Amino acid sequence: YKMACGKIQAEESDDHLLGKDQEESAKNKTYQRYKIRWLMLCALFLLNLTNGIMWLTYAPIPGKSAQFFNVTPDGVDWFSISFFITSLVVGLFAIFSLDTFGLSPSVLAGAVLNSLGALLKLVGSIPAVHSDALQQHNAGFAIAMIGQILTAAAQPFLLYAPTKFAMFWFGEKERTMATSLTSMANPLGIAVAFLVSPRVVSKPDDIFTLSWIFLIPTVIGSISAFLTFWRSKPPTPPSRSAVHKEESFFKGIKKVFKQKSFLVLLVVWGFGAGQMNSLLTLLPQILCPFGYPDTFSGLWIGMMIVCGLVGAFVASVIMDYTKRFDEVTKLAFACAILCNIWGLQVFNRPGQEANVAVSFCLFGFFAFIMMPGCLELGVEVTYPVPEATSSGLLWSSAQIFGAVLTFVGPFAAQPLSPSLSDVEQCSISGSVTPKDFTFTLITYLCAGTLAFLLFVLLFHPKYKRQMLEKKESLAPVDKDLQEEIE
């Protein structure tokens, strides 16, 4: 660890001296970035990746999952809905933990919960648990649901950490990139689930094999976290803003809800991310009535997220160097809506595989740019409130919108036209009743357009963190600047 960090004196590694070391570093105008931050980034990336896999393991194969667990397709949707609810309930405690106890214990707690949940999901898929005697009581479904709830409880500890991790371990021109990579790992995990699940599970009993496949990287991620997250902060800070005195948890919560810009961001990001989460859960059910099987939807949903990762990374580099978070995010939001309109024109027409695939990829490319943009904007407009508070509240908002949209979406779907009875693939995929989700998607589009207008007209941020970092001197902040930050 010390070799990776570079020159660290023995006394500097003591946690009780950490604050003193950082204050002294600030006075001497010395900052340092440690090589171990890249190993920590890989560990946090893998943790969020596997947590995303755990989230939507069964969503790409709703019919086969329903048969395996002896429930309806709506019952399979509850694996996702329970994730929203649990992570929302645990969210405030995760924010408190990150702000009070620090990055290291919080991330390690998430790692343990993630692995325990994955292990229980494996136990819930053991063939013996699905014997006739136990199947009558849905024992496998109950055990798998408990595992799902544990992985959901892990999510806030892992997903709320990237902005805080980037702040304390990365330099000014690396923060957005670090936030993007570690945050985008979660939807990338969802992409892995959509790509792997339909190909491994050709019959319901294959879910046991799938559980083994997904358990292995989850355990590896937890082990890597214990090997790298030994401390919450480096001995020497990487930038001026990393030395700031953070608000207390309760004071920070109270302060952010007085910020008009953050409240707008809370609604806009909450709806945008919540709609994406809902679509990822429901898309196989949306596409199968029009002749698109699980393998097709899984492949191109996965590619949509991969394209989103590319878009988010490119945009992160641009935002790191230009600091144009607001402009880049709003432009990406507008392009995502245009792609959404195109996708709405083609998804409900059989035989449009190429158009559906391209619209998915372009939508993912632009939509996922909002993730690093909004998370960094949340930190900027609420500074010096702790980073975990702003990002945690943004993710909690997304969970609320996601749960509501996922629950309400199927109810807004209409009966499928009889003319498509020979085309639909839902019956082939399993016990899924085909429905026409066109009205649901139109409603999503209208609400998304309204959220975009709200974003453009009412969101005018002040970059408070950047104001502080522009000060060349490390002397106390002048009165005018302090008023702007407050």
Image (spheres, helix red, strand yellow):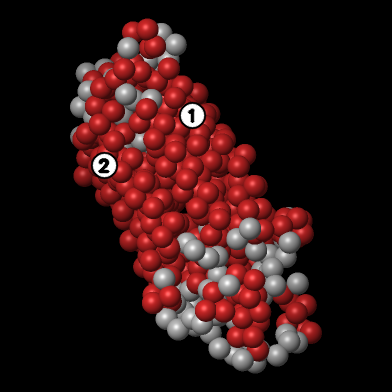
The image position of residue 374, as x and y in percent, is 54, 60
The image position of residue 208, as x and y in percent, is 28, 28
What is the quadrant of the N terminus in the image? bottom left
Q: Is residue 282 left or right of residue 454?
A: left
Viewer-nearest residue: 286 or 103: 103
Q: CB of mark 2 within 8 Å of CB of mark 1? A: no
What is the quadrant of the C terminus in the image? bottom right
Q: Is residue 433 left or right of residue 199?
A: right
Viewer-nearest residue: 383 or 157: 157
Q: Residue at x 60, y 49 (%)?
A: 94
Instruction: Give, as a three-letter code, the residue at label 2.
Output: Leu
Q: Is residue 313 left or right of residue 250?
A: left
Q: Secondary structure at mark 2?
A: helix
Category of crowding for the residue at label 2, using alpha-carbon neighbours closer than 10 angstroms: few (below 14), some (14–19), many (at least 20): many
Answer yes or no: is residue 48 visible: yes
Answer yes or no: is residue 277 visible: no
Q: Determine which quarter of the picture holds residue 300.
A: top left
Viewer-nearest residue: 484 or 393: 393
Instruction: Give, as a three-letter code, the residue at label 1.
Output: Ile
Q: Residue at x 21, y 35 (%)?
A: 199
The image position of residue 95, as x and y in percent, is 63, 53
Residue holding disc 2 = 195
Residue holding disc 1 = 146
How much space separates mark 2 and mark 1, taking CA atoms?
25 Å
